[in-house]
Image: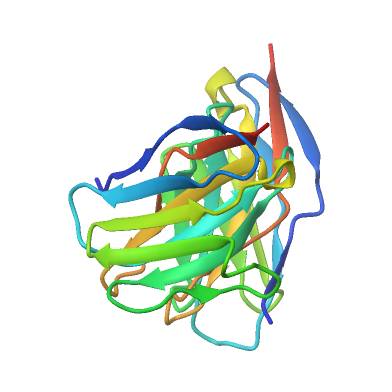
Amino acid sequence: GAVVSQHPSWVICKSGTSVKIECRSLDFQATTMFWYRQFPKQSLMLMATSNEGSKATYEQGVEKDKFLINHASLTLSTLTVTSAHPEDSSFYICSAKEGLRNYGYTFGSGTRLTVV
Amino acid sequence: AQTVTQSQPEMSVQEAETVTLSCTYDTSESDYYLFWYKQPPSRQMILVIRQEAYKQQNATENRFSVNFQKAAKSFSLKISDSQLGDAAMYFCAYSDPTASKLTFGTGTRLQVTL
């Protein structure tokens, strides 16, 4: 089945620095990728939708300049948390949809970000 | 906007028994997709089952089946012969025909006891 690889699985960074999270579709081309944020014991909150070669579409309330998303190829999307602060600490998950099919969305394993 | 509601924050079932998780949704679309995802302690999201709204037949995947009531906008998940490995958070999710994004419910935490 479809596999999405997400790295790193966990990262600790200092306040004020930037962190990049990668999401790769390993065996299919992902025309659309999604980035979610999940707080403890809560549901997934969609942050943005990225389409290959175009600008990401951010959900209301998500800071575009803080959460930079790049979908440069059909197999790679990146999320960069810029000037991270402790309140950005969270679990970030990516998912990908293959082409126009809607057989399901394949999720990465998530990244636990801790900002100290 | 579409909404997905899971009214059971927590459920418990004994091993080998059957449990049903509830989900309702709101949409004005006639064609859409519904999903149940499982999130174990590892936090990896795993697709459990998928239902296409234009199909009247309820989807089934081994021990997992759904009761899809389109008119009532209800999409419950039945887990038969529950196993310890079924313990997880279960999220109901909705997607429109363009599959632009998934809308998740708040989740139900399932405990499986011996």
- Give the camera-side residue of B56 and A114: A114
Q: Position of residue A93 (x, y in %)?
A: 50, 47
Residue B10, quarter of the rendered image: top right
A34, above or below B20, in the image: below
Q: Residue at x 34, y 58 (%)?
A: A77
Q: How is the image coloured?
A: rainbow
- Give the camera-side residue of B114 and A59: A59
Q: Residue at x 68, y 37 (%)?
A: B19
A29, above or below A31, in the image: above
Q: Residue at x 74, y 46 (%)?
A: A87
> Do we see residue B58 in this rendering?
no
Q: Residue at x 51, y 47 (%)?
A: A18
Q: Position of residue B92 (x, y in %)?
A: 62, 55
Q: Quadrant of the N terminus of chain B?
A: bottom right
Q: Position of residue B102 (x, y in %)?
A: 53, 66
Q: Quadrant of the C terminus of chain B?
A: top right
Which residue, as the protein is rendered here, is positioned at the far left? A27
* Image label count: 0
